[in-house]
């Protein structure tokens, strides 16, 4: 079940439109995304590279860069410790490639998801000492590795943290007391000491900021801009909000990607059969998952090797391998989803507010993807646990109304390890604590049944007669779309269906000829219909009316829709059509 809501912020979007000479539709959409201050709007509508925030505003960044500069100049050895997801791989690539170009003696370590788990650990620290490493730089991890950083300092190594995750904390009298690791530099915009104006950048962006400032020390900052294509990939794939600085990074980065000279990235685009221009959709749903697959099922080193590779034949070989691994990941995900849903449906778990499922047979690397799929199915916070090499491990995915990181923090006495964000987290625990954790999370939950109803937020009611090419052009200027800047949704009511067509390989695409109350005709498309559209018509109007609309005859069917306008290009001709994303018969 879904409920439709029209977004209504108490801000005069008509005045904004008049003051800034933009359309009221665009103004309303921006206000709906909490972009209403005039400087915010300017940054959004004109996302120029010179509007990126200065790296020097980030706490400890200048200090960290100068430590790196000193180590490079003295010929010391540096090791980068990353993470196995897209953000981690891109962070390592940026740091390694840039430091190497500055003459650093640098190498890297990416923990194995199964063998090592997330982030820097004691073995990685000791190995670095044995290898004569003077400086460890973490990326996309490290902010919660208090003991490991303490160990590195005891072994007389310097350590710089670059991260973007939440800091660990203890709660005293309902007040959070954040715990800062005792590293030589702690570079994380979520550090409470950090006054950086935008907190929602990904780990690769934090690494890039450090590298950019470091390049200024060598008077090479212009050379650093090339790394923004890799920051853009990480930004989209780490699902951070595509507003403010992230929007600038992705907008600029996509231009670089579509003209890339990186052999590995070109091979990946070719093997993934992505047609140029590459969009944020391609990054998030095709290229990103393919990069991620190596860290899930094999080794993230293979993905990193791809981007470092300069031989086209070898790059194509690695890219094909990554695609094969991703296909395997898809199969494991489908099987895992089926078993988890079956367990929920055949037990009392389905009545819980927080779905916590222990399924020992699924591959731990796809637990997060499965948790996300199950969360989408039930619209409830979901934790999927499975057997790892060192006990029970799992991933959590949440809904807007439930901060999963904070709720797990309230249960940390039951957990061996955990970390993450309000919407996603990873955890490990002893098997004996599984049922206790499930009971406690549910007993502490203040969620209501209303929170589990999927809500669709409509940007504005927009009768289809208002759609024109200029509006579509204005809407396209809001791209790239993603988290925090979703594709706008409009609504219209009481439309008549002049005719209905079915096509596609499985007759699962529906084309409607729609007529507005004012007699305006527009084509509407419903993609991937599972038969429910025809079923809805039959249930409301009967089979005779369905037959009439299929034949283009007069009928009594009335339709409310939510939609996005687009341009259809077919055989050299262009026309306006709407993509229907929801309907009520």
Image (spheres, grey):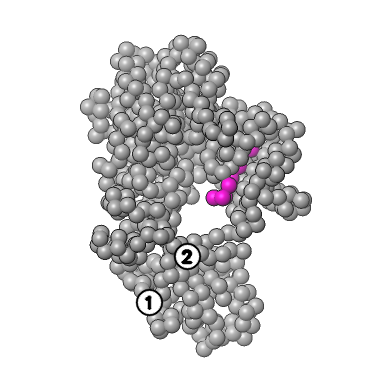
Q: Position of residue 249 (x, y in %)?
A: 34, 43
Q: Secondary structure at mark 1?
A: helix
Choose mark 2 or mark 1, whichever is in front.
Answer: 2
Q: Is residue 390 above or below residue 39?
A: above
> Image quarter for residue 54?
top left
**Magenta span:** 394-402
Q: Is residue 532 above or below residue 163?
A: below
How many marks the image carries: the answer is: 2
| Labels 2 & 1 near each other (Cβ < 8 A) | no
Comparing 322 with 85, the one in front is 85
Q: Which mark is residue 65?
A: none
| Quadrant where the image shows the N terminus | bottom right
Q: Secondary structure at mark 2?
A: strand
- Can you identify the residue that label 2 sits on? 6
Answer few, some or many: residues within 10 Å of disc 1's Cα (few below 14, many 20 plus, some between 14 and 19): some
> Image quarter for residue 438?
top right
Residue plotted at (61% across, 70% down)? 532
Q: Is residue 283 above or below residue 475?
A: above
> Per the image, is 400 magenta?
yes
Comparing 556 with 440, the one in front is 440
Q: CA distance from mark 2 to mark 1?
A: 19 Å
Left or right placement of residue 205 versus residue 384 in this view: left
Left or right placement of residue 20 versus residue 326 in this view: left
- Can you identify the residue that label 1 sits on? 465
Q: Position of residue 213 (x, y in %)?
A: 30, 29
Left or right placement of residue 277 versus residue 126 in this view: left
Please say whether residue 316 is visible from this viewpoint. Answer: no
């Amino acid at each position: 079940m879904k409920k439709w809501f029209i977004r209504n912020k108490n801000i005069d979007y008509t005045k904004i439109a008049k003051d800034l000479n933009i359309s009221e539709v665009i103004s309303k959409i921006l206000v709906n995304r909490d972009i209403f201050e005039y400087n915010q709007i300017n940054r959004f509508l004109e996302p120029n590279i010179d509007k990126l925030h200065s790296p020097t505003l980030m706490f400890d960044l200048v200090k960290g860069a100068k430590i790196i500069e000193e180590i490079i100049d003295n010929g010391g050895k540096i090791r980068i410790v990353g993470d196995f997801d897209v953000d981690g791989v891109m962070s390592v690539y940026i740091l390694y490639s840039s430091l190497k170009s500055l003459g650093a003696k640098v190498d890297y370590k990416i923990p194995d998801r199964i063998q090592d788990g997330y982030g820097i650990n004691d073995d990685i620290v000791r190995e670095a000492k044995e290898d004569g490493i003077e400086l460890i730089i973490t990326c996309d991890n490290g902010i919660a590795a208090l003991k490991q950083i303490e160990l590195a300092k005891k072994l007389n190594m310097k350590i710089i943290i670059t991260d973007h995750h939440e800091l660990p904390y203890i709660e005293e009298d309902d007040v959070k007391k954040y715990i800062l690791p005792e590293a030589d530099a702690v570079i994380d915009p979520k550090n409470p000491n950090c006054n950086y104006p935008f907190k929602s950048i990904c780990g690769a962006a934090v690494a890039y900021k450090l590298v950019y400032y470091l390049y200024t020390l060598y008077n090479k900052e212009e050379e650093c801009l090339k790394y923004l294509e890799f920051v853009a990939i990480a930004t989209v794939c780490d699902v951070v909000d595509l507003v403010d600085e992230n929007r600038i990074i992705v907008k600029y980065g996509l231009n670089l990607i579509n003209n890339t000279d990186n052999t590995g990235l070109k091979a990946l685009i070719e093997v993934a059969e992505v047609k140029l221009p590459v969009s944020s959709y391609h990054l998030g749903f095709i290229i990103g998952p393919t990069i991620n697959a190596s860290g899930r099922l094999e080794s993230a080193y293979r993905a990193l090797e791809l981007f470092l590779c300069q031989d086209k034949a070898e790059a194509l070989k690695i890219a094909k391998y990554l695609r094969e691994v991703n296909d395997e990941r898809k199969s494991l995900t489908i099987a895992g989803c089926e078993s988890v849903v079956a367990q929920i449906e055949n037990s009392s778990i389905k009545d819980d507010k927080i779905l916590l499922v222990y399924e020992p047979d699924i591959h731990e690397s796809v637990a997060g993807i499965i948790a996300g799929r199950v969360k989408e199915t039930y619209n409830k916070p979901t934790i999927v646990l499975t057997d790892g090499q060192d006990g029970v491990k799992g991933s959590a995915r949440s809904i807007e109304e439930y901060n999963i990181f904070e709720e797990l923090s309230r249960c940390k006495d039951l957990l061996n390890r955990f970390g993450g964000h309000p919407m996603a987290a990873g955890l490990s625990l002893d098997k004996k604590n599984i049922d206790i954790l499930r009971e406690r999370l549910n007993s502490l939950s203040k969620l209501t049944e209303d929170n589990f109803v999927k809500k669709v937020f409509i940007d504005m009611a927009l009768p289809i007669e208002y759609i024109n090419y200029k509006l579509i052009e204005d809407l396209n200027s809001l791209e790239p779309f993603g988290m925090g800047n979703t594709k706008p949704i409009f609504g219209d009511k009481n439309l008549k269906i002049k005719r209905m067509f079915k096509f596609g390989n499985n007759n699962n695409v529906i084309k409607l000829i729609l007529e507005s109350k004012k007699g305006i005709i527009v084509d509407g498309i419903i993609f991937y219909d599972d038969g429910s559209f025809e079923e809805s018509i039959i249930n409301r109007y009967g089979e005779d009316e369905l037959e009439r609309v299929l034949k283009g005859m007069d009928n009594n069917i009335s339709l409310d829709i939510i939609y996005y306008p687009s341009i259809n290009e077919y055989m050299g001709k262009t026309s306006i059509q709407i993509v229907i994303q929801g309907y009520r018969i």
